[in-house]
Amino acid sequence: MHLGLDLGTSGVKAVLTGAAGEVLAQATAPLAVSRPRPLWSEQDPAEWWRATEAALAALRRTHDLSGVRALGIAGQMHGAVLLDAADAVLRAAILWNDGRCGTECRELEAAEPRAAAITGNLVMPGFTAPKLLWVRRHEPEIFARTRRVLLPKDWLRLRLTGEAISEMSDAAGTLWLDVAARRWSPEMLAATGLSESQMPALVEGSAPAGRLRPEAAAALGLPPGIPLAGGAGDNAGGAVGIGCTEPGDAFLSLGTSGVIFVSDPGFLPDPGRAVHAFCHALPGRWHRMSVILSAAASLSWITRVTGAADEAALLAEVERAGLAAAHGPVFLPYLSGERTPHNDPHASGQFFGLTAGTERADLARAVLEGVAFAMADGLEALEARGARIPALAAIGGGARSRAWLRILAATLDRPVLTVTGAETGPALGAARLARIACGDGGIAEVCAKPAIAAVIEPEGDLAAGLAPRRATYRRLYPALRDLFAAAHPETVR
């Protein structure tokens, strides 16, 4: 057996797989996000460990974990965990969807004008490096005590193994990695006042990266000494989980954020369109992503603020009302700012076209559409540099909604595929990497594509109804961009 953990934003998921890679069981323990100030997003790493213990305890209630041969970890990217000389956490982790450091982004670009060429990416507030510049400015005593900076999943690895190790796919999202060379960049580290001695060691995601300490093994009910794989950032882990590993393979993820991911034959940066170009979790491979910051998070938000019982109940309400509405509000899903293609941490969520007759189902349908429209912007950005993506597999919690996938297929104008096991997401990818790392299979064997469960083809009538609404959507951001900036005058470009 092999175990995969996914340290997500909303929870820690554990997936147990059998000798042939089949999913035997899965469990999730929830996490909450703290937003103490506007644009801030933080979590206490201690909560990650408690959620990991809870997820493993749930698995142990139904399965004996004494036969687990290796463990893999995937996780939310870009978070900054600051540790002192004794590896004690110095402050709450600053997360990927935190937008406080717009000023520091500009400072980093000025300090290292070759940043985009080295990293293949624009300097964005969500990335790790500008967060450290913010800490240096606003919390200098903490910055002075910082002896190590880890990404969220790699802090979890430190708890599990006692070793500070990262891997290429997650490290690529820090802005400290020379992504083409797959090594830390001395220039980017120097631009943030750091050195390589404060970074973890680097391995490939399918390579061994530490062994489980006896104390951690006892807490989790696992065999001591089993190897950990290097693992993956969450999206690269999801890609490994559905076999998106060869050039041209692509998928969309409807998790807290929304991602379109395409595997590339080499390093193909396109920072001008706010496309992310990162290392894949497998050796000698790279990928590109378009990213929106609030996908399923937008659905969770509208569910909460409208008082619906839960997301499933609200989605059923939308389906009863019908998907092909000619009128109703249009939604900008920028609840945490936006990345592709706008790179604007100050963009905010908006409803346009509310009337006295607007119902809850209208708002929810607008949210589904707005996320689809934002994903379409990202797809266009990806295809401007690469070949046309003919079809997209769907993963993530939002992919359980056939109504949402119908809207996406019609908006993107291409088939959307559902695949078996898609709900396991990055945790399955982490388990697959664990299997490779302990020598129980090679990449081609382990990273096979799952069976296609359904194909959602674009529907002409639905696409025709959505087209004018998307046209309105695309006019709204340019019209509001200056107002978004004016709402944050201290960090405006």
Image (spheres, grey):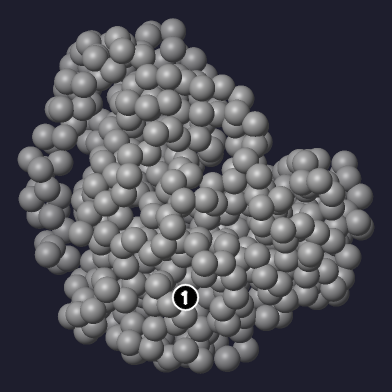
The answer to whether residue 258 is left or right of residue 425 is: left
Q: Disc count in the image?
A: 1
**Element under disc 1:** loop
Residue at image coords 88%, 65%: 223
- Residue 252: name its quadrant: top left
Can you give x and y, in whole percent of width and height, for residue 71 in the image? 75, 61
The residue under the point 47% across, 89% down is 196
Which of the 4 image quarters holds residue 215? Answer: bottom right
- In front of the other: 4 or 7: 4
Q: Is residue 110 left or right of residue 82?
A: left
In the picture of the structure, the residue carrying the numbered disc 1 is 182
Residue 130 seen by the camera? yes
Vertical comparison of 238 with 271: above or below: above
| Residue 369 drawn above or below residue 176 | above
Establish if 377 lies above or below 314: below
Asked if 53 appears above or below 252 in the picture, the reply is: below
